[in-house]
Amino acid sequence: MEDLIAKRTRARNRRSVKGQMRVVESILAILIVISAVTFFYFFASAPSSQARDVGELEKIGHNILHDIDEQGLLARYVYRSEWGNLTSALSVSLPINVYFSLSIYDVNNNPINHPLIQYGDQQVFSSSAAVASVTYIVPGYQMNYNPRILVLKLVNG
Amino acid sequence: MRLAKERKGQFIIIAAMLLSIMIISVSTVIYGTVTYYRQERWEEYITIVDSIKTASCNLLQIGLANYTQTLNPNVTRDYFNRWIRDARSAYPGYGVDVNYALASGLRSAYGIAPPINYSLGLARRWNVPTSYSVSNATVSINIASVGLTGYNFSSNVFLKMSIRDVVWYTGSGNWYVIMYLSVDKEELEPIISLQASNFASVKLSGVPQSFSMKRYYSSTYQRFIYEIRVNSVTVLPSSANITLVDNRGIKTISYTTNVQQV
């Protein structure tokens, strides 16, 4: 009889140990899965809003230069040195809170002399961390091939 | 027996590890694809392609303007050869490569008969009632840095001037000639912004004339019409000859001997 009780006690103890091990195993399994899921979400993080802003500004800048070019005005402004008209066209086309600065180069990247084509303080461009830059080429005007490279810098005010 | 039971007990951990490996593997693949396309500056590449495309179309226009004013048949080819080099240097580090194929031989377009006969991407038919100047090229853009190859587009530039009627009015002691013209560009879209200064010369019987110009939509012709009036014409003209240079610098010359008297 005592043997039987002792056997039952040993068996109960063994089951108890086995049950505790299941709990430990489950905790370990949960930890492993949570680690994997955390790893997954770490990689799936969204890009910074700054990167999105620059992309948006580049899109806006290119579209505006393209629109002015489509109307046949961009080449005229650049080759006839109508800098005031060019500044006005850009100012009117861009959103109010966007500052711009336009530089013009020849095909060898030598700067073309022109007055400041800019809206907003120069300091805004040097201090801002997110400056979008758009390069646009105007190949010539009327019947003459003489490329000009327009570099439009944009920043959110 | 005990060993077998212990093995069965490790099943949860093994399953969890397998699941984790699956999640990590899938996340690595997703990360590779999603972040590659996200972190590439696609907007920048699109603007470069778009900028080169627009510039190539403008180049064709400049070439046609030069050809119609200098009659140099090689001008478009020369411009494109220079453009290939300059586009590469304008976007250093991108591996920009522009190729072109200028239209050649007979091609039908814009309902013009006979078909347009291109040579080195250029064609013109002047000194007829419906005159035109046209250029056509297929351009291919490659950007090696992003593996973009074979982006092709076809571009054309077109200017057409039609003399609809030339009428010599002789009533009420005031003798004058009115020429009714229509001017179209690509896709046969009417050009409606021309000024008198765009008509470089107006000749009657081969003699240059001073003239005035009106423009309006004509219900008679069912299209936008330029009306050129020459006063004090005392003799029925044998011919009318009009030279047009549009705002893009493209020239065409129309000519007719069909002058009506009213």
Image: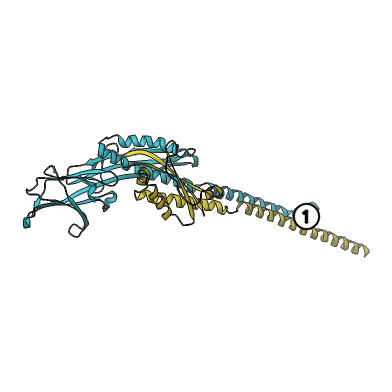
Chain colours: A yellow, B cyan
Q: In this rendered view, identify the residue nearer to me: B236 or B122.
A: B236
Q: Chain of mark 1?
A: B
Q: Amino acid at mark 1?
A: Lys
Q: Is residue B243 left or right of residue A96?
A: left
Residue A93 in the figure: left or right of residue B124 = right
Residue B69 quadrant: top left
Q: Residue at the location (80% across, 53% down)?
A: B2
Mark 1, other Cα within 10 Å: few <14 / some 14–19 / many ≥20:
few
The residue lying at 79 percent from left, 60 percent from top is A19
Q: Could you tell me which secondary element the residue under label 1 belongs to?
A: helix
Q: Is residue B1 left or right of residue A59?
A: right
Q: Read off the residue under disc 1.
A: B5
The image quadrant where one finds the C terminus of chain B is bottom left
Query: x%, y% of residue B109?
Result: 26, 46
Say whether residue A49 is visible. Answer: yes
Residue situated in front as seen by the camera: B66 or B76: B66
Indicate the position of residue B229 as horizontal and vertical percent values.
Answer: 15, 52
Q: Is residue A149 left or right of residue A2?
A: left
| Residue A105 location, quadrant | top left
* Along the viewing direction, whichever of B18 and B260 lies nearer the viewer: B260
Q: Is residue B114 visible?
A: no
Give percent across and percent down for residue A37.
Answer: 65, 55
Residue at 90% x, 64% y is: A5
